[in-house]
Image: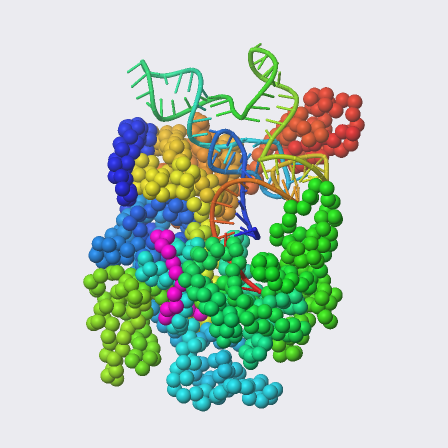
Amino acid sequence: MFAASGGFLNFYFESFIFDFLNTPIMDENKGNYNFNDIEKKWQNYWETNKTFAAGEDKSKPKYYVLDMFPYPSGQGLHVGHPEGYTASDIVSRYKRMKGFNVLHPIGWDAFGLPAEQYAVQTGTHPAQTTQKNIDNMRRQIKSLGFSYDWDRQVDTTDPKYFKWTQWIFLNMFNSYFDKQEQKAKPISELIKKLEAENFYIGPGSEIICADPIPAVTGEPVGARKWSELNKEEQEAFINENRLAYEDEVAVNWCPELGTVLANEEVIGGVSERGGHPVIRKPMRQWMLRITKYADRLLDDLKLVDWPESIKKLQTDWIGKSIGAEVDFKVDGFDEIITVFTTRPDTLFGATYMVLSPEHPLVDEITTAEQKNAVEEYKKTAQSKSDLDRTDLAKEKTGVFTGAFAINPVNDEKIPIWISDYVLISYGTGAIMSVPAHDDRDFEFAKKFNLAIIPVVEPPKDKTIMQGISNPPMVATKDLTEEALWSALYEEVMKCELCFTGNGIAVNSGEFTGLSTAEFKEQITNWLNEQGLGKKAINYKLRDWLFSRQRYWGEPFPLLHCEDGTTIALEKKDLPLTLPEVKTYKPAGTGESPLATIDEWLNVKLPDGRTAKRETNTMPQWAGSCWYYLRYLDAHNDSTAWEKEKENYWMPVDLYIGGAEHAVLHLLYSRFWHKLLYDLGYVSTPEPFMKLVNQGMILGEDGQKMSKSRGNVVNPDKVIADYGADSMRLYEMFMGPLEAVKPWSMQGVEGVHRFLNKLWRTLTDEKGNIKGIITESDPDEETNRILHQTIKKVTIDIENFRFNTAISQMMIFVNHISKLEAIPKKVTESFILVLAPFAPHIAEELWQKLGHSNTLAYEPFPAFDEQIAKEKEIELAVQVLGKIKDRIMVSAEADEEQIKEKALACEKVQAAIEGKDIKKVIVVKSRLVNIITG
RNA sequence: GCCGAAGUGGCGGAACUGGCAGACGCGCGGGAUUCAAAAUCCCGUCGAGCUCAAACUCGGUGUGGGUUCGAUUCCCACCUUCGGCACCA
């Protein structure tokens, strides 16, 4: 736990001081409750009675509360885990008391790099490390008294689990995306369709529906019928349509980790885990066609109740942009270069063109004089890592190819350059440059002295500001706003400034005078008619790189035959388990350690052929993409989950976890879910209806917790010193759930005192319920505070404001601790209100009050609005907004009575003496404001 | 650079839909209890001024403006911190 060098000594020293100061306080004082025994007692009770086991009870409404399951690390829990888990546990316990049938499971996301890195270093099998870590974390989680249904635990590394991960992968492998219906369907249906001759295969391997086409244009040009393809072509075609496919792609290769990484796993040019350098390298990899789902992933965000910020992150990550593809002829060649642009309206201002250095036409069109320069530039671009490319992005670089393109709208010859600011992986890998209206192009044109022609006239109002990203430091002091706008306007028209906003077209032939929006539409239509271009949509989202060259992951259930074909295993052959290996080190050649195990690798097929297994493994995300479904039916060996159970429990009603999964896990999961939805395995289009992110907990020094800073708080120690109930209560009392907030041990002590006070108020030295707890009826005030407390806690739980709920409970306990006699009914109601937050002490007191059953399913107390209302209200009396006095009025007092009383105050009289009263504002149960003239 | 969130006492934070800023907790000061301490209980605690004291007056929610009878809350500009993206045409 304190594994950093020197950590042991620190730990010893700290704990020594800590125990010295605290041990006598905790244990030797009578009146302090013995949380240790109580918490163990109730944890045992819940476990042996399976108090929280859930079944499909049709008589109750269901409620599915999900925690993002943890990676079982060797560090064990940190205090950030229990934050989300406590919140979800409070909601779970509350919902049970409200009559819901609650599913609240937990499991282990146990594949992944740390256990494997440890294996590489020590030779210990990752399964062993993983098991040890799971055992430790399970112990820790259990010690917090969470109401999980432990019978439903899942472990992604368990073959009984990953059998189904592999099965879902096979479903992807055996599916294609139907463009018309916008959904996944089995490949077998595609083949059936094609064999029925209703479809053609286009030259670009697109599927063309035969029905409307012959009527309009006859047979599509270059298209062939399925039967006209030979067997290999058919095979290749099928493979190109699979949702899981192999491709040669430029990947993020991390030499240190010996694996490729997804774009999302590379942060600023280094690996997310470990911070190792990452370079670009073309490799054969398994990909998942998440891009087919881009629109649905985007559109369906409106179905879910998620924080807007997370929705926005996903929206930006998908990065949909609508524009046009335009074809440019290359002067002197037959070739055409297609560009993607979101501003087809600026076509008349395209003064040059830029290709990505990796663009396939670069070599062909480069002139002899430019050959050397281009070659050299390509070489440097290639050797640059992504990090370098970004870093050097401050200064644009590029080389002229010597070739020219023809601008299709005005037949101007424009030079073709190459530059690495154009990415091969987005759009068509080529752009038309409109320096007058694109910041990057402007910068490039200025550097290389290329022509700049303004074609959009900016508006001369404040909207001009929105189109200028770096307004120069004009002497704004002396300028009115209007003068500033026209100064900027002049600069734009003189090509001294780049304007990227909307305006009116100029220098644009017949289109001159159109607004940006009109122009876009008209030119797109015009291009279409002329056969020069078409409307196009592009996404930032890329297909998901799904293979890793590691040992500790799910093996792909695939065989590669000698003839180059790929065979998927049958469901009955799953799970395909990992073989034992001598070393866990990746081969370093881009192959996983699995490639070195011949007995596993080589397979003899029933027909006598030999085949090799796929040696890549799946990334850690695979197992976490669907675990919430396995919880529904965790022990089923014949199916991943029963349809009926899925129907009952899904979707997840509440999902709590860290915001760091905003675009990784949450996007991947949604993608898998939609695929499963298309194939009919799940009944909802979205898996997680409500999402709540817990904020990070910082160390006591306000810094991010880390071993090197020595500010890590160990939950085991907090529980040992103050108990699980105090730990839970403090985690919630710290502040709003979503906020980032620092830990404070003194704060834990504060809530611990609250629980002690409650205990002392209700029990005597021997731990028996005090005689002052009587069968009497509550006085009016006590009853009011009780109902106010029930009300506030109820509303606060429903809105995830646990901190203020706890404040109110403190107010309640402060009140009853002063009473001579406390009605038993009031006490019991309060215990039930407290129970979701501090379940152990609540169960213990509940039992002491004479109940033999757990309170977990007792109805949550209801509040009476009338009782909760104050009878007498204090109002502030203001004169011209300044408080002069306060008055007490009955809650029923009407405006006239209040006015009268307010005006009667001596201090008010003094303040308004000799002045006219213009107006008296009465805000119900708040204040009175007297306006004088 | 762009996008998003947030700035409130010594500290964590509270404040419904524009209506008494600082609930609740921590810390601190004072007192009670105790041989003494811890624990516990009670009182006080935004700042400044004035006062023996109470009362009272003024200022105060990152900064500067604005709207309003009234702004922590709404609008504009700016500063700071955190999170995300980072040449996506």
In the displayed structure, does residue A171 sit left or right of residue A587? right
Q: Quadrant of residue A605?
A: bottom left
Looking at the image, how many numbered discs can be counted on the residues? Answer: 0
Query: Depth check: A542 or A809 in front?
Result: A542
Determine the residue positioned at 72% across, 64% down.
Answer: A506
In the displayed structure, does residue A795 sit left or right of residue A26? right
Height in image: A331 above or below A661?
Answer: below
Whether the magenta-drawn stretch holds residue A284 is answered as yes
Determine the residue positioned at 43% across, 87% down.
Answer: A229
Height in image: A98 above or below B34?
Answer: below
- Picture coordinates of residue A355 (x, y %)? 53, 68
Whether the magenta-drawn stretch holds residue A585 is answered as no
- Picture coordinates of residue B31 (x, y %)? 43, 15
Determine the residue positioned at 71% across, 48% down.
Answer: A484
Query: Depth check: B85 or A278 in front?
Result: A278
Q: Which residues are magenta?
A: A273-292
